[in-house]
Amino acid sequence: MNILIIENEVYLAQKVVSRLLDDGHSCVYAEGPNAVPDSIDFDTVLLSTSMPSLNYNEIIKKFEHSIVILLVSYISDETVTDPIKAGAKDYIMKPFIMDELLRKIYHFKDCRQLKQELQTMRNYLDFIFRDIDLSESNVVVELPLLIETNSQKCVDKIAFEFSYKLNLPIKFISLAKDNWQKEIQANKNKELLYLTDYHTLKKSSKDNLNALIETKKCLICSLESENEFPYNKTRVKKTDMVVINDNIMTINDYVKLMVVSFQGKYPDTELSKKLGISRKSLWEKRKKLNIEKKK
């Protein structure tokens, strides 16, 4: 990391710089803010609040994208409370143990990295779910809940929405795996259980599962109709989503799915070519399969 130390106590600053260099960091030392180079981006700024007549808020604002840790001789509104309100992350009292200072530096570095990774994952989820409009789907909020669907991706989106609403992490369990029963039994209702592949279970296994999840915060995805599910159930069918299940589609179902999915992307000439049929055949398929042409 690039670390800036703004400290007017030279001996202390030299001690800090020496230890940080030993740990493999790059350090710049300045006795005051005017001596700080503008050409370097600093990951962490160690800012002493012992310097008289210094506008700490101005310095913190300048380094708003850095982790600012205060080096303080005493605690007051001026040395701690106000700078933290301005954006400083933490403080450490002088004299301090260097290991404690390093612990704080690494702690906030890890926190920042986790926040960045979390934001990246949320951006990715927004990206892959961007074309799934569930505004017309009446999904009940009572759990356990089974959702019959033609696309697991739709239920994936619903699972994350439940997770945000309930403020619970998601436990992903595929019912096609052998250990699903142990994983469900180990759950203490501190997670949202998201169970996929319900349609792959035999009736006896479904009965066992239904008994296990009666009191669980559980969302279940099935790619087939489930007439005997004893709890809340709903259906989310998207005609413009690709069907992914264990069934073999008929030729007409496949053609209908491809036309509905891609007619907004390709003109009829190109779409019929990709399907290996003539434009006339495509027109006839639309009429036969009751496919409304998008304008």
Image (cartoon, helix red, strand yellow):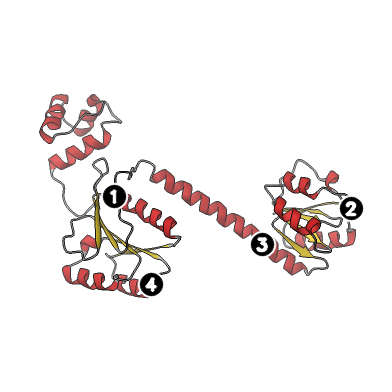
Front tag of 2 and 4:
2
Element marked by disc 2: loop
Could you tell me residue 47's position as x and y percent? 79, 55
Of the two numbered discs 2 and 1 on the same chain, state the one appearing first in sequence: 2
| 272 to the left or right of 96 | left
Looking at the picture, which amino acid does disc 2 mark? Pro
Query: Gap between marks 2 and 4, in whole Å?
Result: 56 Å
Mark 1 lies on residue: 138
Of residues 222 and 134, the one nearer the viewer is: 134
Front tag of 2 and 1:
1
Could you tell me residue 78's position as x and y percent? 80, 56
Image quarter of residue 292: top left
Front tag of 3 and 4:
4
Of residues 101 and 75, the one nearer the viewer is: 75
Element marked by disc 4: loop
Looking at the picture, which amino acid does disc 1 mark? Asn
Query: Gap between marks 3 and 1, in whole Å?
Result: 46 Å
Front tag of 4 and 1:
1
Mark 3 lies on residue: 106
Mark 2 lies on residue: 52
Looking at the picture, which amino acid does disc 4 mark? Asn
Element marked by disc 3: helix
Q: Is residue 7 above or below residue 271?
A: below
Mark 4 lies on residue: 187
User: Does the residue at mark 2 contact the one at mark 1 (Cβ under 8 Å)?
Assistant: no
Image quarter of residue 254: top left
Could you tell me residue 213's position as x and y percent? 30, 70
